[in-house]
């Protein structure tokens, strides 16, 4: 608002004077530049050799005057002399602007209002002349170092299409071509620096940082872009504070109090050297240390940091700055600076008197300084002004002057018919217009003596090239820095950032990378769970659920293991699931196999007893042929249980069920045959009965064969249509695989069992009907017991089989086979063996036929 009022007063005053005075009369007071030299073409410059101003509240009752500045800023002073050096170097070159000379007008002003006034003066051209015969205005303006002042005058200068080239104004807002159509810069935009700083912070694992900026365009825009880039990198900000050096004291005290109470140990700053000095001074006074500073280029390389009381707190700071280059001849040029070469520069006189502690004015009676004797030379003193060991931003100034010179050179070397304007026309060589220079500056492309290529993109920005630096020490008047890495935004992403972290000297003299996180890293086997109401960087570490793993630190999610894998106890690796089946190597498998072998042994022993007494009445009376066939089938029943033990395979799955079904049918068929024989034998004793001729040995064999063939047919159909096969059951247990035999066709399996059950039920009914036959040794009674046991076992088998998990299903099936086989063996053959071995006196035909006087009932 003040600037608008100022411009309005100037315009009104001009209108009033135009009505009375000649049109070329100077309006207002002339403001002469600090340095000036005539030339065919003139380049302007705006710098601030002093950084402070006394606060004055303008009433705007009259046109505000120029304010007095205070404090020295030798860096800005060096920038101005770099402009002069570059212009004089170009004037000596025969290949650049031959036959033309460059002049300069360099203003020294501080404060936005006076800087704007200097820019208007450069646009107006010569002042203090009586006739308007000299063309006015400059071809381009180099400066200013600050973003805020540059924004102020670049918007105005852009309306006149005069190029403005800054070496230090990094605010991204200046890339807006609509607002700043004539702005260029030889320093990258903070857009790139913000992204690079976010990557740098994430590289060191700092996910919990503080952010402080000054409250102007540079700080607000730069920090806003950093916060956005940091969020994309997964970095959280604990606090974000802003302040101005001219603000009230309670603002800086509030920020210091925030830093003291914060848990983050890394602070990212976007501010100038003025604000950082005020901040660290207050931190020093309150004895707050141990912070790792990440700075922007605006203060990292400033030698004036030594002016602050707590400058030692900044040792170890890291950040990006422009690349260090060499300017041959600049050192000798600066050492040759003398007040006599620029007699109109008051600042040069003040600088000279400060360096040599003498006075250029005649001594007074109360004068404390001696008069300079003329022998003083900057070449004889060690001064920051003549130090050229760390040329960074001065090289940007150097490039800016050369960019204007190359643009002007292209204007004057344009060939008619090949120009960039309408119909191939060129600019007027005698007096090129500002917009001509602006056009050629946009397309300028040249290489500096050091090999760096200089060009501007469509927004007037230079390529993003930085050095990553580390403040090693701060001594009086000098900031000692070390280059530890490079960033080049023009390269592919994987090649942009190169760094050597081993050379970093961290804050407080630490050798290890500082830690700044809201929560400690989650180890492998856990995942991050964001704490409610807090940023994503604050989290709890939750163990991965069973079956999921995380094999990296700070995993956001746990990964599900594939079907045949399961998580280990730590939850960081997927391991193959335990494959489980009834094995010969485990206790249950060994016990069942032992019982099966014992059953086979007992069966063979019974067969041996029967064979050795095959001619005795009790063996012959019980159909020895069926008895031996029954013993053979029982042996197979005991043996078929062994096929259920061991790793299931395609053949074992088919064998175990079919062998079980056929052997048991063979066994039950034999028992059924024996039962029928018993019943028919007593039926044949009735008078006139000839039933035995229908159930002789041949019929018995055929019945056993017929019953067995039916089961064989069922098994063949089962194996043909849908046979059993090995199957990995991963549903029953999550952490292991049950290797079992899938039935294939459940109908086939239950048909086999159903047929066995049918025969068993028929055998039980017939035996039950003959249980009271009048003989001393009623075999039908024992067959009834055996069938009762058989049926009881297999009836209870069905629910046990369905409900048993994993390998216990197989164990239940084996147990049912062994139990039912043992029941048949014991109930049918044990009483006979007892008679044969223990009571041979009962093994007589009379006793078997029930004609003995000694009745023994079993």
Image (spheres, rainbow, N blue to C red):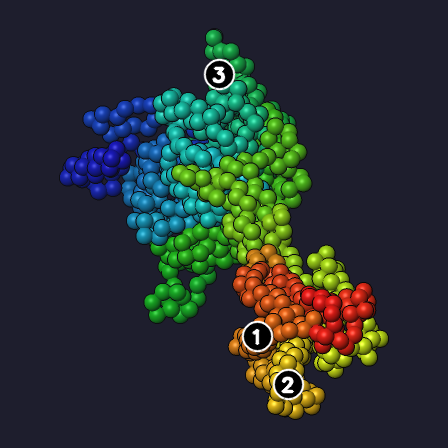
**Total tally of numbered discs in the picture:** 3
Disc 1 secondary structure class: helix
The mark found on residue 769 in the picture is 1
The residue closer to the viewer here, 507 or 320, is 507
Residue indicated by mark 2: 684
Relative horizontal placement of residue 593, taking residue 498 as reference (left or right): right
Instruction: Tell me if mark 3 has few (under 14), some (14-19) or many (20+) residues whose alpha carbon lies within 10 angstroms of its own.
Output: few
For discs 2 and 3, the disc positioned in front in the rendered view = 2
For discs 1 and 2, the disc positioned in front in the rendered view = 2
Asked whether residue 415 appears in the rendered view, the answer is yes
The mark found on residue 362 in the picture is 3
Q: Picture coordinates of residue 649 (x, y %)?
A: 68, 72
Instruction: Tell me if mark 2 has few (under 14), some (14-19) or many (20+) residues whose alpha carbon lies within 10 angstroms of its own.
Output: some
Disc 2 secondary structure class: helix
Disc 3 secondary structure class: loop
Separation of disc 1 and disc 2 at Cα? 16 Å
Q: Compared with residue 133, is residue 266 higher up or lower down, i.e. above or below?
A: above
């Amino acid at each position: 608002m003040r600037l608008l009022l100022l411009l309005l007063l100037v315009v009104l005053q001009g209108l009033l004077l135009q009505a009375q005075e000649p049109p070329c009369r100077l309006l207002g007071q002339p403001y002469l530049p600090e340095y000036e030299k005539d030339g065919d073409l003139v380049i302007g410059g705006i710098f601030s050799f002093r950084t402070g101003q006394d606060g004055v509240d303008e009433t705007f009752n009259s046109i505000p005057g120029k304010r007095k500045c205070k404090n020295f800023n030798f860096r800005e002073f060096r920038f101005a002399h770099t402009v002069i050096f570059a212009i004089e170097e170009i004037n000596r070159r025969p290949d650049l602007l031959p036959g033309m000379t460059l002049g300069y007008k360099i203003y020294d002003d501080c404060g936005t209002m006076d800087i704007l006034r200097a820019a208007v003066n450069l646009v107006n051209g010569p002042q203090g002349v009586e006739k308007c015969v000299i063309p006015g205005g400059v071809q381009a303006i180099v400066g200013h170092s600050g973003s805020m002042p540059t924004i102020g005058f670049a918007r105005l200068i852009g309306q006149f299409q005069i190029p403005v080239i800054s070496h230090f104004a990094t605010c991204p807002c200046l890339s807006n071509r609509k607002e700043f159509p004539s702005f260029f810069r030889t320093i990258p935009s903070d857009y790139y620096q913000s992204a690079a700083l976010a990557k740098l912070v994430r590289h060191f694992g700092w996910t919990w940082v503080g952010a402080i900026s000054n409250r102007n365009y540079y700080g607000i825009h730069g920090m806003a872009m950093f916060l956005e880039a940091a969020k994309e990198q997964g970095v959280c900000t604990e606090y974000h504070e802003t302040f101005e050096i001219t603000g009230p004291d309670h603002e800086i005290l509030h920020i210091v109090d925030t830093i003291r109470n914060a848990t983050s140990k890394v602070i990212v700053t976007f501010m100038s050297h003025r604000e950082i000095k005020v901040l660290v001074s207050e931190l020093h006074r309150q004895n707050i240390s141990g912070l790792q500073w990440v700075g922007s280029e605006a203060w990292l390389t400033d030698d004036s940091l030594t002016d602050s009381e707590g400058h030692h707190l900044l040792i170890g700071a890291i950040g990006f700055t422009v690349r260090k280059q060499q300017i041959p001849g600049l050192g000798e040029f600066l050492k040759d600076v003398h007040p006599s070469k620029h007699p109109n520069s008051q600042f040069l006189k003040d600088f000279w008197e400060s360096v040599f502690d003498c006075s250029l004015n005649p001594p007074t009676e109360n004068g404390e300084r001696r008069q300079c004797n003329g022998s003083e030379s900057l070449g004889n003193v060690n001064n920051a002004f003549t130090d050229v060991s760390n040329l960074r931003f001065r090289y940007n100034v150097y490039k800016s002057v050369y960019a204007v010179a190359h643009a002007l050179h292209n204007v004057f070397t344009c060939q008619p018919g090949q120009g960039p304007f309408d119909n191939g026309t060129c600019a007027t060589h005698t007096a090129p217009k500002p917009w001509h220079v602006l056009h050629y500056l946009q397309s300028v492309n040249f290489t500096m003596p050091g090999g760096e290529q200089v060009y501007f993109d469509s927004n007037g920005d230079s390529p993003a090239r930085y050095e990553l630096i580390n403040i090693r020490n701060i001594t009086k008047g000098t900031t000692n820095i070390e280059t530890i890495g490079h960033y080049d935004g023009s390269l592919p992403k994987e090649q942009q950032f190169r760094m050597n972290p081993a050379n970093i000297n961290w804050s407080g003299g630490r050798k290890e990378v500082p830690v700044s996180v809201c929560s400690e890293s989650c180890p492998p086997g856990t995942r991050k769970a964001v704490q409610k109401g807090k940023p994503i960087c604050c989290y709890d570490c939750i163990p991965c659920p069973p079956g999921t793993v995380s094999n990296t630190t700070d995993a956001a999610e746990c990964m599900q293991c594939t079907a045949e894998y399961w998580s280990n106890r730590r939850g960081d690796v997927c391991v193959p699931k335990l494959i489980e089946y009834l094995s010969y190597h485990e206790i249950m498998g060994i016990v069942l196999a032992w019982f099966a072998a014992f059953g086979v042994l007992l069966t063979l022993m019974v067969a041996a007893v029967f064979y050795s007494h095959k001619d005795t009445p009790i063996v012959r009376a019980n159909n020895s042929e069926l008895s031996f066939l029954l013993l053979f089938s029982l042996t197979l029943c005991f043996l078929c249980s062994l096929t259920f033990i061991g790793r299931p395979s395609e053949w074992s799955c088919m064998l175990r069920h079919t062998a079980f079904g056929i052997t048991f049918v063979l066994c039950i068929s034999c028992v059924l045959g024996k039962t029928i024989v018993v019943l028919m034998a007593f039926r044949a004793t009735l008078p006139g009965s000839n039933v035995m001729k229908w159930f002789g040995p041949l019929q018995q064999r055929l019945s056993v064969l017929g019953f067995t063939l039916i089961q064989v047919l069922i098994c063949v159909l089962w194996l043909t249509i849908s046979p059993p096969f090995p199957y990995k059951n991963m549903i029953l247990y999550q952490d292991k695989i049950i290797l079992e035999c899938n039935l294939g066709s459940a109908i086939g399996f239950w048909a086999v069992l159903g047929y066995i059950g049918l025969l068993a039920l028929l055998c039980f009914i017939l035996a039950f009907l003959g249980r009271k036959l009048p003989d001393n040794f009623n075999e039908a009674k024992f067959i009834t017991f055996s069938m009762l046991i058989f049926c009881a076992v297999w009836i209870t088998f069905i629910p046990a089989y369905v409900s048993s998990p994993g390998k216990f299903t197989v164990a239940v099936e084996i147990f049912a086979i062994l139990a039912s086989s043992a029941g048949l063996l014991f109930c049918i053959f044990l009483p006979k063996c007892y008679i044969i071995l223990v009571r041979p006196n009962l093994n007589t035909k009379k006793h078997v036929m029930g004609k003995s006087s000694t009745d023994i009932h079993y």
